[in-house]
Amino acid sequence: WGDVDASAVQREMIRRTIREHLDKELRLRPMGVKVLSLFFIDEVSRYRLYDADGNAIKGDYARIFEEEYTRAAKLPTYNGLFPGVDLSQAAQEVHNGYFSIDKKGGWTDTAENNAGNRDNAERAYNLIMKEKEKLLGFETPLKFIFSHSALKEGWDNPNVFQICTLRNIQTERERRQTI
């Protein structure tokens, strides 16, 4: 990132991804197409943390996303996308993370040590990885997906219109595999 404030750059990347997403939604929703956007992140803890009791806490990326989404949703340009929507709650419902699940079915790179968090994480995993029709339905609010390295196993979804990489991709090969 050089001398530039990395958090300011990442905030701008999140802001621009949200705006591009909403612009595409304005064009494609009338055609019955749900728009999805994908964020690749450098560390799970920058999106989701856990307290001593195993309760999920929003990390920097989740907080920045919600601030920027709420700000964008209030712009006159996007009013038509939010009829009857409580904008104070909308940002929390449109994003979630899917993070690696190990071969034994346990969760990795997270401290999900209570049943509620395991259930929430499993629901997110199933929705994103296994229930494409449900994910693509307009009744499912999830539109922005945060991932660390979980999608390396392959995930095909033609409705992903933006990919925002909030991590440093080292090689051209890795960049191509990510996309």
Image (cartoon, helix red, strand yellow):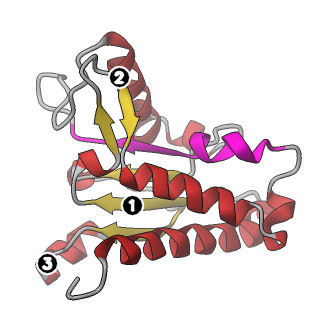
Give the amino acid type for the residue marked by disc 1 in the picture: Phe
Q: Tell me the SS state at disc 1.
A: strand
Spot occupied by residue 6 in the image (x, y as percentages of width and height): 29, 75
Q: Is residue 88 magenta?
A: yes
Numbered marks: total: 3
In-image side of 26 versus 118 (left or right): right
Report the quarter where the N terminus lies: bottom left
Amino acid type at image mark 2:
Asn
Label 1 crowd (10 A; few <14 / some 14-19 / many >=20): many
Q: Report, in whole angstroms, how far the alpha carbon at label 2 lies from the one at label 3.
A: 37 Å
Secondary structure, mark 2, is loop
Q: Residue at x 47, y 68 (%)?
A: 14
Q: Dot 2 corresponds to which residue? A: 55
**What is the magenta range?**
85-100
Q: Nearer the viewer, mark 2 or mark 1?
A: 2
| 159 lies above or below 176 | above
- Please say if 107 is above or below 136: above
Q: Secondary structure at mark 3?
A: helix
Q: Nearer the viewer, residue 76 or 2?
A: 2
Q: Residue at x 81, y 73 (%)?
A: 77
- Name the residue nearer the viewer: 28 or 166: 166
Query: Label 3 amino acid?
Result: Arg
Q: Which residue is mark 3?
A: 173
Q: Nearer the viewer, mark 1 or mark 3?
A: 1
Q: Is residue 99 something one can see in this rendering?
A: yes
**Disc on res. 39:** 1
Residue 83 point in image, percent of width and height = 88, 50
Q: In terms of image quadrants, where is residue 32?
A: bottom right
Q: Which mark is residue 60?
A: none
Q: Residues within 10 Å of mark 3 (few under 14, many from 20)?
A: few
**Residues under labels 2 and 1: Cα distance?**
23 Å
